[in-house]
Amino acid sequence: MTTKTVVTSACTLYEGELHRSSQNFSLEAYGRYADLLFRAYYDYGTPAQREAEDVMFDIWIDEPMRHNPVYLRDICSKHAAPTMKCDRLYIANPRGAQKEFTVVAEAAIRVDSQATAMSDHKHRSSDNFYLDELPDGDVSLHIFYHYGTPIQKRAQGISFSVRQNKLMRHPRVIWEQVTDGATEHNEAYERLYIADPQGAEEPFTVIIAQA
């Protein structure tokens, strides 16, 4: 699986442009139904690298001879979204940037969960999911309400555990008290599910990416 796309953006619009601040980049290599996590950095790939948490930007589609449509609007670092299978995207309308910044798009795992345990289950609130497509090592978890819709927002105040479905054995607890932005260790786990959600107002989505 392709796991990372990197594009550098100016902190202001390119000269003569109404919206553009980067060259074109592509998300064609990701699967048709892939999910992505976007992060922004200053000084990417150097010892001084730090997350550009003050930056907001859009991603537009470069459509020659017509008005360019918007793929994503008002993105901050750690924004997640279903992929746009397109080879002509660009960063647009950067706001708040101190200087040139780099946007990194990474393949992620999507897990949809109920707000409480599923019917006829004591703990489980999601279907099984697998982390074997992500590299071994630390992963970060990001929680959203209304994922993939215009009213998507971060789901603050939720916690849950992650269990592993072991055939003929009691499910093993892998992670406990997971909250938005948490970092956990991945060992290419299989047959995982979200369990015992607390504080959820409604169904939510968890996006898991390499930390």
Image: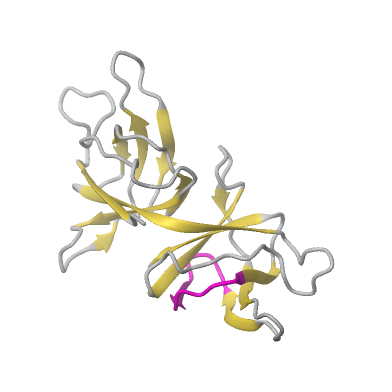
Give the residue drawn at x 76%, y 67%. 117
Quarter of the image holding residue 192?
bottom right
Q: Position of residue 46 (x, y in %)?
A: 15, 64
Question: Is residue 184 located in the magenta-colored stretch of the structure?
Answer: yes
Quarter of the image holding residue 3?
bottom left
Give the residue drawn at x 30%, y 13%. 65
Left or right for 98, reference 206: left
Left or right for 147, reference 74: right
Nearer the observer, 11 or 108: 108
Residue 6 vs 139, above or below: the answer is above
Residue 25 visible? yes
Nearer the observer, 138 or 152: 138
Q: Residue furthest front?
A: 168
* Location of the C terminus (image quadrant): bottom left
Q: Position of residue 20 (x, y in %)?
A: 25, 30
User: Dominant secondary structure of the magenta stretch?
Assistant: loop
Q: Residue furthest top?
A: 65
Left or right for 183, reference 200: left
Q: Which residues are magenta?
A: 178-192
